[in-house]
Image (cartoon, rainbow, N blue to C red):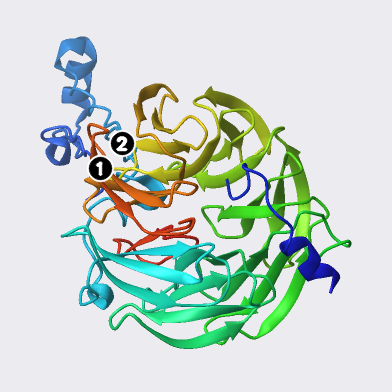
Amino acid sequence: MGRLSGVERSRSSFRRLGANALLALSLAGCQAASATPSAPPATPANTQAIAAKPSQLPSAAPTVHPSPTIAPSPPPGGIYAATVTGLLSASVQDIPARVWVPNERGSKVVVIDPATFEIVDRIDVGAYPEHVSPSWDGQLLYVNDMHTDFMSIIDPRTAKVVGRVAAPSPYNLYFTPAGDRAIVVEDMLQGAPKEENGLRFFTYPGFKEVGFLPIRWAGADHLDFSADGKTLYLSCEYSARVEVVDVASMKVRTDIVVGGLPTDVRLAPDGGRLFVANQQLNGVTVIDVTTNQQIGFVKLGKGSHGLSLSRDARSLYVTNRIAGSVSVVDIATLDVRDTWAIDGSPDMIAVSADGAQLWISNRWDRTVVVVDSATGKVIKTIATGAYPHGLAYWPLPGRFSLGHNGNMR
């Protein structure tokens, strides 16, 4: 079929490349001062006396001004407030901490115990697994088996495949913030209608298909949602664009030309900016989501590809796949705090539940590297096999999962 022909093509080296309380200030004695003292009963005599002696007039009641109100500061982490504490929700606390690594060319998911750095399992899945995506409620993991037209479902408690979901060429999987839709990204080398490049919408949790949005720009890749969940932003890797899509109507509103080869995208904690990794322009494009205009660019290392936020939501980690490094960007100021050389070909990135470690797939080097998130020191390099890609550290703190490889809010 024409759709599958694009999938089977060899890909370039760039491919997949309490909130602050309100401070109330009150004036002492306002209650007493608000009542005006009554004057003695007036008679003609004392009226004349008062008129003759103005100094004896009763003083006017003081003007009572409203207490000044100081606007509350936004909660730490902004839209990621539920993730910054590092605390797991009760529904996932019994899931053992594991790192799930899809081996793109090996048709397996490698399972690593992050406490020992040991591989504890290798799970057979479909051909060309790209990402491991936690379900919206965190109870299951979906493996995007791109060359097998389905997604394998793994129970993270037992590390067993418990089912499949039919989906043509699934490259990436996302869930709406409301948890009522699942969206499969079909990433093709040619835009629609030449290939089924676009977004396939399903009900969730039933996975009944409700629509397909063809994207004419080649390389539908990664996406993220607006703060209210009504809009999604989709990178088109081979077309230098980000598509702005209305989630309810499943229609494209507009597209934003960013140039280069845009890959991973992530909404800033303030909800007003979108970060777009660009592996050809070697940095991160910053977009104002109110105007859909580019408002900045952060120059980084060669091949900027994957994005993740620090546990306190103050830093943006960016993998530079060609440079073999990770850059740390201050989210508030967009200053580059540091760049750490880790060698290899760092691709996708996951932050541990406590925020102390970065787990990074070295896509072309067949390894996963573990990095100290404070110092950039490489803690461990783990050989995993053929082309590790969209790894997931699970479970993670947050109210719900947006999919991908563990985007939480």
Q: Position of residue 12 (x, y in %)?
A: 67, 45
- Dot 1, crowdedness within 10 Å: few (<14), some or many (≥20)? few
Residue 296 pos. (x, y %): 58, 25
Depth check: give the residue in front, 25 or 96: 96
Give the secondary structure at mark 2. Answer: loop
Q: Residue at x 57, y 32 (%)?
A: 286
Residue 270, percent from left and from top: 45, 41
Give residue 161's quadrant in the image.
bottom left
Q: Residues within 10 Å of mark 2 (few under 14, many from 20)?
A: few
Q: Earlier in the sequence, mark 2 or mark 1?
A: 1
Task: State yes or no: discs 2 and 1 in contact (Cβ < 8 Å).
Answer: yes
**Which residue corresponds to mark 2?**
69
Marks 2 and 1 sit apart, C-alpha to C-alpha, by 7 Å
Secondary structure under tag 1 reads loop
Residue 22: assigned label? 1
Q: Is residue 143 visible?
A: yes
Q: Nearer the viewer, mark 2 or mark 1?
A: 1
Quadrant position of residue 372: top left
Residue 387, position as x, y percentages in the image: 49, 55
- Snapshot quadrant of residue 49: top left
Indicate the quadrant containing the C terminus: top left, top right, bottom left or bottom right: bottom left
Mark 2 residue type: Thr
Disc ID at residue 34 = none
Residue at the image point whose x is 17% and y is 36% from the top:
30
Q: Is residue 359 visible?
A: no
Going by the numbered disc 1, the residue's amino acid type is Leu
